[in-house]
Amino acid sequence: QVHLVESGGGLVQAGGSLRLSCAASGRTFSSYTMGWFRQAPGKEREFVAAIDWRADRTYYRESMKGRFTISRDNAKNTVYLQMNSLKPEDTAVYYCAAVQYSSGSYYSPRDYDYWGQGTQVTVSS
C-alpha cells in the first residue's frame, strides 16, 4: 500500500507557473505508475498526465502538451507536475494517483488504486 500527499497548489495569475509535488510512502515507489488528475467544480475527474513505472515514459492530456511536464524522483519517492502558461480553465483540485505494475492503461481514474487528498490550484484572469 502507498500513501500519497500532494503539495504546491495555490493562487496564480494567468500565464504563471506552479509545481505540484506528490510524496509517496513506502519502499517500492519505483514500481508504481504515477498519474495526475484534476477535478473542477461540477465536472468529472479528468486525466492530466502520467509517468510509467517501467521506462519513465510520459503521457499527457492533449490540451496539456507543451505546458505541463510530469517527472519523478525515485530516490525521493516523489512525482512532480510542472505547470506553465496556466489558464483560468486550469483551475481545479489536482490529485495524485498511483497503481503498481500498471498494465498499460493510464487515462482513467479506474486505472489507479491509490489517491492523495488533492491540492487546489486557482488561476485568476
Image (cartoon, rainbow, N blue to C red):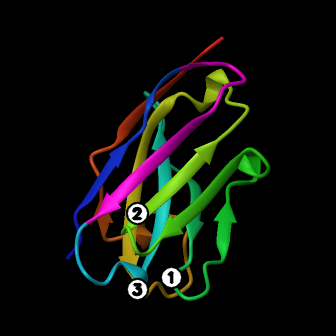
Q: Is residue 107 visible?
A: no
Q: Which residue is mark 3?
A: 31
Q: Residues within 10 Å of mark 2 (few under 14, many from 20)?
A: many
Q: Is residue 115 above or below residue 92?
A: below
Q: Amino acid at mark 3?
A: Ser
Q: Amino acid at mark 2?
A: Thr
Q: Which residues are magenta?
A: 12-24
Q: Which is in the foreground here, disc 3 or disc 2?
A: 2
**Residue 24: percent from left, percent from top:** 30, 65
Q: Residues within 10 Å of mark 3 (few under 14, many from 20)?
A: some
What residue is rendered at 73% in x and 32% in y?
Answer: 85
Q: Which residue is mark 2?
A: 78
- Earlier-in-chain disc, 2 versus 1: 1
Residue 4: assigned label: none
Q: Is residue 99 above or below residue 55?
A: above
Q: Main secondary structure of the magenta part?
A: strand
Quarter holding residue 86: top right
How far is mark 3 from mark 2, CA to CA? Answer: 13 Å
Q: Which residue extends farthest top?
A: 125
Do the numbered discs 3 and 1 sit on residues whose CB atoms are within 8 Å? yes
Task: Let me know if residue 14 is in the magenta part.
Answer: yes
What residue is rendered at 39% in x and 62% in y?
Answer: 97
What residue is rendered at 49% in x and 51% in y?
Answer: 37
Q: Amino acid at mark 1?
A: Trp
How far is mark 3 from mark 1, CA to CA? Answer: 5 Å
Residue 53: assigned label: 1
